[in-house]
Amino acid sequence: MTGLLAADPMTQIPPSIRFVLLAAALAASGGAVQAQEDAPAVPAQPRGGPVELLAGARVGWPQQVSGYVGVALVRKRYENGYAGTSLVVEPGLGAGAVRVGWTTAGGIGMTARAQLSILRTWRDPWVVGPDQTWLGADAQAGFGYVGVAVGAYVRAPTDGAGPAPMLTLNLVLGN
């Protein structure tokens, strides 16, 4: 058995060098442990799928009071939000609209949306007459699920009526 111990390479290394090697090994392993503690176990990934629901209500002209529902097709996710294309359908008392655009959302209900819109009036809309079709653009911004939307439209030439401009202003509740 002494023959086996004599062949052990550690017994051939002087004790002072063994101590230095042990200290170096402990120092190296301590650095690796520190690096593991600094790095998160799983990288933080934003949650959610590729579709977000859009819903809310608007008060303004020409539609008077309206509700909207739609989807955002998310292209990029952030820690507390997203950005992507949107499709919204908005029926109201005096008009209805279909909107396609770009939407972004962040924490605490912060939203911004730029949309191309087709708007059709009926019954008794505010500011303009019924049974007219309007083409235009709409911009919406909100904070805490309350915001405003402004739009610029041109009446489509139908039934002998020529093009005419219209500006819209709406109070928005929702995302």
Image (spheres, helix red, strand yellow):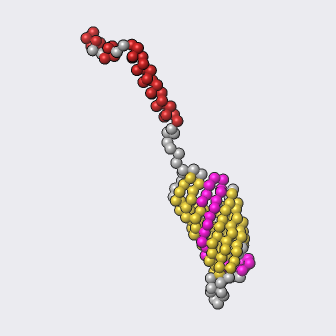
Q: x, y percentage for residue 8?
A: 30, 16
Q: Answer whether residue 123 is magenta in the image.
A: yes
Residue 134 horizontal side relative to residue 15, left or right: right
Most foreground residue, 88 or 24 = 24
Residue lying at the far bottom of the rendered structure: 160
Image height of 138 relative to 105, above or below: below
Which quarter of the rendered picture does the N terminus lie within?
top left
Most foreground residue, 22 or 160 = 22
Q: Residue at x 48, y 27 (%)?
A: 30
Report the magenta residues as a range. Answer: 104-128
Most foreground residue, 99 or 150 = 150
Q: Is residue 16 visible?
A: yes
Image height of 45 relative to 41, above or below: below
Most foreground residue, 147 or 14 = 14
Q: Residue at x 57, y 69 (%)?
A: 100
Q: Residue at x 68, y 67 (%)?
A: 149
Q: x, y percentage for residue 95?
A: 67, 76
Residue lying at the far top of the rendered structure: 2
